[in-house]
Image (spheres, rainbow, N blue to C red):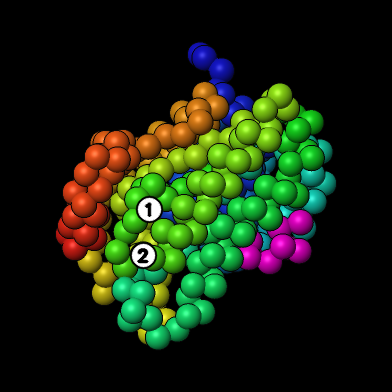
Amino acid sequence: MAKQPFNDNVVIITGASTGIGAEMAIQLADQGAKLVLAARSVDNLEAVAAACRERGAEVAVVETDVSDKAQCATLIEKAVVAYGRIDTLVNNAGTSMWARFDELQDLGIIDRIINVNLLGSMYCSYYALPYLKKTQGRIVFINSQAGRNGVPTRTAYAASKHGLVGFADSLRIELIGTGVSVTSIYPGFVSTGIHSRIPGPDGKLLGTDHPVDYEKAMSTEKCVEITLRAMAHRKREEVMELRGKVGVFVKLIAPRLTDNVAQKAIESGR
């Protein structure tokens, strides 16, 4: 049997209590990784950790709000105390919105999105870097198609993800020669359930009142499988959907067409 690429690899996953982060923990547990799971919900984290331990994985759980730089520092410290090193950091924690910018009633939504999606990834990466340099490890950013093109109703979300592209690309250049790789992942709609937990214009969570068609979205399992392959090969980036791969080039010659495609994708929820 071929060796699993993440066997005995110490992996920190932020936003590991649900969705992509939780599924990644499960699949990495099957590969024999040593896991550090971080999120705000300890109860959900413990449930994911229990499932990973049933698969034979070693798991540490660290309650973490990545928008708080002190908590990010503590996360990294506890990972090193638990395992003595860090091999991979997956910046997965994120939040979103579903509202036109001119209809927002609560500007705190913007603060939360930027703080979690962009600053949280920067904080965790900063504190983890000294240890990742020692192991010639990996930094992974779970981005979005919204990081490559504008998306209506996601203005602050798209801004945070565009910022993450700039950070990842700049950091990659700075780390040339250190052995540390930087991988950006660009999923489209994934059936994670996140859209029920994001705010509308008034700041209240959407619950079931969202237009995303999860039956036609990519499964979380498939998204994670693709992500882990990209991580294993230390790819620069992984764009998961054809329209995302084509969209960057179309935008150069027909930007209005790209805008129309983005608008229709949001209207159809897929």
Would residue 69 be visible to someone looking at this image?
A: yes
Residue 176: percent from left, percent from top: 67, 28
Residue 209: percent from left, percent from top: 26, 74
Query: Along the line of sight, which residue is nearer the eye, 207 or 7?
Result: 207
Looking at numbered disc 1 in the image, what kind of residue is underneath it?
A: Ala
Provide the secondary structure element on which disc 2 rests.
loop
Query: Along the line of sight, which residue is nearer the eye, 181 or 63?
Result: 181
Q: CA distance from mark 1 to mark 2?
A: 8 Å
Crowd band around label 1 with a 10 angstrom C-alpha radius: few (<14), some (14–19), many (20+): many
Residue 28 sits in quarter: top right
Q: Which residue is mark 1?
A: 146
Question: Disc 1, disc 2: CB below 8 Å?
Answer: yes
Magenta part of the chain = 65-73
The residue lying at 74 percent from left, 41 percent from top is 129
Crowd band around label 2 with a 10 angstrom C-alpha radius: few (<14), some (14–19), many (20+): some
Looking at numbered disc 2 in the image, what kind of residue is underneath it?
A: Arg
Q: Which residue is mark 2?
A: 154
Q: Is residue 32 left or right of residue 108?
A: right
